[in-house]
Image (cartoon, grey):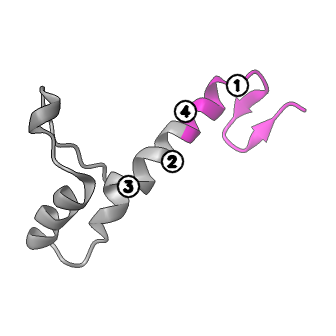
Amino acid sequence: MPVVLSSGAVDPLLMRGPRDLAALMGLIDREIDWLDSVSTNPWKIVERNREKLSTGFVVPGVKVV
């Protein structure tokens, strides 16, 4: 299951950088690549949702050409 990290900040000045978030979570669990949770995983979720919104989408893995 992909994990997505977020700073939860309500003000841009309170936001943490992606590497800072990954480093903080790395203190808790070193077996997971936390950098993916702030970079790769959110991007994959956006791509998957954009694919679902396309006109040729039927079900995951099936497209009308």
Query: Label 4, on which residue?
Result: 49
Q: Are marks 2 and 1 in contact (CB under 8 Å)?
A: no
- Place of residue 33 in the rendered image (x, y in percent of width and height, measured from the top left): 31, 71
Q: Amino acid at mark 2?
A: Lys
- Place of residue 24 in the rendered image (x, y in percent of width and height, measured from the top left): 11, 63
Q: Amino acid at mark 1?
A: Ser
Residue 22 vertical position relative to residue 64 in the rendered view, above or below = below
Answer with the quarter of the image where residue 32 lies: bottom left
Q: Amino acid at mark 3?
A: Pro
Q: Which residues are magenta?
A: 47-65
* Residue drawn at point x = 9 percent, y = 69 percent: 28
* Residue drawn at point x = 33 percent, y = 56 percent: 37
Q: Is residue 33 magenta?
A: no
Q: Residue lying at the far front in this picture: please name it.
A: 13
Q: Could you say which disc has been placed on residue 54 in the image?
A: 1
Q: Amino acid at mark 4?
A: Asn
